[in-house]
Image: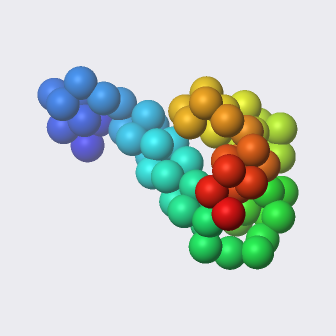
């Protein structure tokens, strides 16, 4: 499995992290769950880890993103 992802230029863990962030982003828009609840649901270590990863990927914190897209 690792070789298949490596051939595409992406690691399996990077792909999984991207999918989790994308699904968490969608949950921010579609639910009334808190940022902490979404972080826990998508199995990020904690809310601050989720916020850092989210901001690195989308340029805004999860809270800012939800406010701008409400």
Task: Indicate the position of residue 44 as horizontal and vertical percent values.
Answer: 70, 48
Q: Quadrant of residue 26?
A: bottom right
> Residue 37's image quarter?
bottom right
> Can residue 59 be seen from the camera position used here?
yes
Front-lying residue, 26 or 1 = 26
Q: Residue 64 at what x, y percent from top left?
A: 75, 44
Q: How is the image coloured?
A: rainbow
Above or below for 42 versus 64: below
* Residue closest to the eye, 39 or 69: 69
Q: From the viewer's perspective, is 16 left or right of 1? A: right
**In which quadrant will I find the C terminus?**
bottom right
Number of labels in the image equals 0
**Residue 30 or residue 70, whichever sits in front:** 70
Residue at left 76%, top 75%? Answer: 32
Q: Residue at position x 72%, y 62% from top? A: 38
The x, y position of residue 16, in whole percent, is 45, 46
Q: Residue at x 82, y 64 (%)?
A: 34
What residue do we see at 78% from left, 49% from top? Answer: 63
From the viewer's perspective, tell me whether residue 42 is left or right of residue 40. Answer: left
Vertical order, 1 against 52 (above or below)? below
**Horizontal side, residue 6 vs residue 32: left or right:** left
Q: Quadrant of the N terminus?
A: top left
39 shown above or below 10: below
Question: In the orientation shown, which residue stands out farthest toward the bottom?
Answer: 31
User: From where the camera sits, is residue 39 visible?
Assistant: no
């Amino acid at each position: 499995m690792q070789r298949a992802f490596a051939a595409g230029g992406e690691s399996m863990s990077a792909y999984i992290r991207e999918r989790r962030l994308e699904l968490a982003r969608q949950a921010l828009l579609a639910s009334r769950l808190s940022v902490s609840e979404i972080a826990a649901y998508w199995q990020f270590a904690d809310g601050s880890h989720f916020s850092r990863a989210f901001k690195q990927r989308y340029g805004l914190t999860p809270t800012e993103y939800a406010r701008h897209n409400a």
